[in-house]
Every structure is written in C-alpha cells, then in structure tokens.
Amino acid sequence: MTVTYTITVLLDVNSMQDVDDRAESRSYIIADHDSGRAIIIDAILDNVERDITILKELNLNLMYALETHIHADHITGASLIKDRTGARIIYGGGAEGTVTGVDAFLADGQELHFGKTVLRALATPGHTAGCTSYLLPGAVFTGDALFIRGNGRTDLQGGSSEHLFDSVRTKLFGCPDDTVVYPGHDYHGRISSTIGEEKRFNDRLNLSIDKPTFIAIMNKRRSPPPAQMDVAIPANMRAGRLPELASGR
Ligand code: FE
C-alpha cells in the first residue's frame, strides 16, 4: 500500500463548547502529496480562520469539505470554508433529505478522488441515522460511530444502538486491523487508534461483546444533551450556513 497523503490533526478551540461538554472535537485536513489537492473533514465554524491559514501555508488547494454527520455539539465550518475557498460540501448519503446547502452526497461505497488519493464512504449509521465514515488506504475517519475505546451516544438524532453495533462490527471492523482510526472526538487526549486495537480493547464494542449486551449497556447510559444542541443542529441542517449569511447571498 502506497500512502499518497498527509493527515493534519486539528483539535477544537470552539467557544460554544463548555468545559462540562468535554467534547474535544477533531477536524482533519488530508492533503494529496503530488497534486496539493486537499480535503477537510468535520471543519468547525470557530476554527475556520486557523484551518485556512494552514491550507495557505501548505499551498493546498481545498477541493472538498466533508462532514461525517449532522453534529449536535458545534456548528460546522463547511459553508464558511466553501465561501472562502470554493471547496464543495460533501455529506454521506444517509444525510440526504435532512441537510440543505450540500453539493454532493456520497452513498455507501462511493469514492471521492483528489489527486492520487481515493477516499471511500462507509455508511455507519447509529450515532445519528445519517452517519458516514470515510476510508483512505490505511486510515478511517469514524466521526462519532467509533471512538478510541468507545463510541458515540445513540439516544439523539435518530440514533440506534442496534444500527451502531452493526456499523462498527460489519463496516469498520471489516477494515484491515492496521487501519488507523481517527475519531470525531476523544475525551482522554488520544489522537488515534487502530481497528485491531478497537477489536480487542474497545470498552463496549470489542469482539467479546454481543449485540444484546451492547444495546443493554447503551440503554443504561444517561448523558445530558450537548449544551448548545438547539443552536447547533438547526445550523448544521443548513451545512452550517447561519441565517444572516444565508439571506445575504
Ligand atoms: Fe456527533
């Protein structure tokens, strides 16, 4: 396997996120080596200027702003990034019909090419009904489907513990064991894991746990909703386009 890209891992400095949320959101810039073409996954509105500075410094041509799902804890930067760079906004096929302002939806198995690098969409519903992970050779961006040693909540936005179990076990655990996992959040200061590690050590989804046990564990969890959910979800259903921006264009 020839790796044709470089990943820049970006931590969140989003002011919407209070400390109690401990959301620790992650964004990723992935740059194709030869062409300088790039994508960003799960950009955050508050961090757009920083992200654009990086793109300029590295002389990257941002082709696509991808979202793994409709986030409840922060506002996506996808629309502002599109305005600033001309990048096209891409969501997974599961979000079609739920989110507006999107240039293309990638159905399960569909590919996106930027330079020599090829990304493939993996439909991984369960955290939300429309969650999608993005697979590169050697790396997978799992959004809130699979975390390092954990997984996203399943009690909001059409979530389903049964669907999440199937998504992780069949889709994500179907990737080679040495595939590096880059999650949408991490609450313990970790950057990455591997599929093989998660098969062994994931708290709730390791291979020794069956579906009824997983569902029972998830049913017992009680987490408060994200603090800014009522602001974030409506904005994210417009791909992060705020009302005042929408009317001005
Ligand atoms: Fe989420």
Image (cartoon, rainbow, N blue to C red):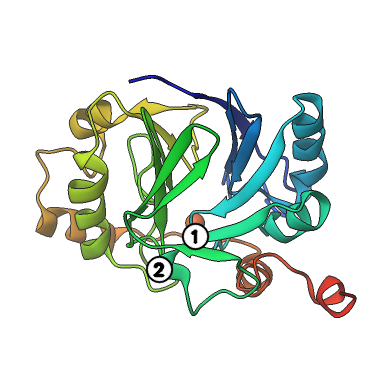
Residue at the location (21% across, 55% down)?
Answer: 165
Query: Quick one: 162 or 58, which is closer to the camera?
Result: 58
Depicted 63 relative to depicted 245: above or below: above
Q: Residues within 10 Å of mark 1 (few under 14, many from 20)?
A: many
The residue carrying mark 1 is 69
Q: What residue type is labelled 2?
A: Gly
Numbered disc total:
2
Q: Which amino acid does label 1 sit on?
A: His
Q: In the drawing, does residue 2 fall left or right of residue 29?
A: left
Q: Quadrant of the N terminus?
A: top left
Give the mark nearest the N terminus, 2 or 1: 1
**Marks 2 and 1, how far apart in space?**
9 Å
Residue at the location (65% across, 46% down)?
Answer: 63
Residue at the location (75% across, 38% down)?
Answer: 51
Q: In the drawing, does residue 125 fall left or right of residue 23?
A: left
Note whether residue 82 is visible. yes
